[in-house]
Image (cartoon, rainbow, N blue to C red):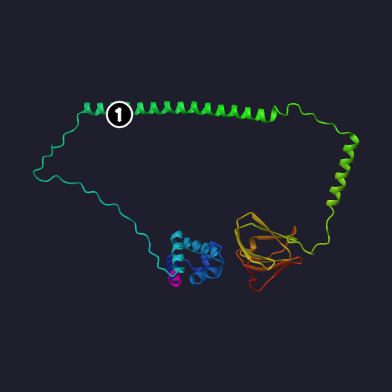
Amino acid sequence: MLDKFADELRQAREKSGLSLQQIAQKSRIDLKFIRAIDNGDFAFLPELYVKAFIKQYAKMVGLDEQLTIKKYESAKKGKPFDEPEEKSLPEIKKSKPEQGENKEAVKPVPAKVVKSFEESTVKEIESEQGNFFEKLKRDKILLSGVIAGSAIVLFLIIYFLFLRSNSEIVVAEKPYEEIRQENQQRYVKEKTAAVPDNTGTAFRSDSLSLLIRASDTSWIKIGIDNGGAEEFKLFPLSSKVVKAASVFNLIVGNAGSTQLKLNNKDLNLSGKKNEVKYISIDKNGLKYLDNPPTFGQK
């Protein structure tokens, strides 16, 4: 099914007179990805990027983008795609009078009757509107009375429970020397509690803090401390902070538009726009990987 879908894209491209190089140049998508789509190979990047590239390809060759994506999803499931048919409205035929039928059988209604009917209808509508607004006014007055009564009852409850019983509260004034000693003891306790405990482990669970910022849309897959992977998308001028004890393993989908900071220190991530990079980051810095990193189970 995917091969058939790719053939339809290729035929549309040839019909539009565009070459693979022209599509890559105008869409700013890497030529190798355009060639993969044209050859029916759709496993070159995550699904998010593949659909985005297919939509751009369809737009360049004059196809409907949303319909093309639906065809791709059906082809991926191995199912044929049935295009929706436009439903035509049934034609209304005017019935012709049969021969011998009396054309004057339906007589027009007199104007006086129509005028009388309209006047009575208008009076009924005006009467119903007057009743509705009158009822609304009564309900509004009743609601205001209920709210005012509830407020008075609430005030009386608060007054008798709290204000009246505490009307004569005598505050005993402490001597100055006693207050000074209490403040001094409190200061000593706070200072003792602020001393860090260095007897713990060498790394805390958040000893490494990684800031990921994107200047353009970027897809990220990250594993923390050899644990399960988290996958997310960063939109232009957005960022995300993740923390780990010892190591991060990442797949960066748009290296040219992604910046990294480890504990507020810039990491030199090299790459081009839409280029995929495999990297590992620990306390010593950034290291490039030749193959995608493996992620454990959450």
Q: Residue furthest right?
A: 177
Asked if one can make out residue 213 in the rendered structure from this viewpoint, the answer is yes
Residue 221 lies in quadrant = bottom right
Asked if one can make out residue 219 in the rendered structure from this viewpoint, the answer is no
Foreground pick, 256 / 200: 200
Residue identifier under label 1: 121
- The image position of residue 107, as x and y in percent, is 16, 34
Q: Is residue 3 magenta?
A: yes
Foreground pick, 298 / 123: 298
Report the side of 287 relative to 115 (left or right).
right
| Residue in view at x 25 percent, y 26 percent | 116
Q: Quadrant of the N terminus?
A: bottom left
Report the side of 249 relative to 189 (left or right).
left
Q: Is residue 24 above or below residue 149?
A: below
Give the residues in magenta.
Answer: 1-6
| Residue in view at x 36 percent, y 28 percent | 128
- The image position of residue 237, as x and y in percent, is 63, 54
Q: Is residue 61 magenta?
A: no
Q: Is residue 95 above or below residue 201?
A: above
- The image position of residue 205, as x and y in percent, is 73, 61
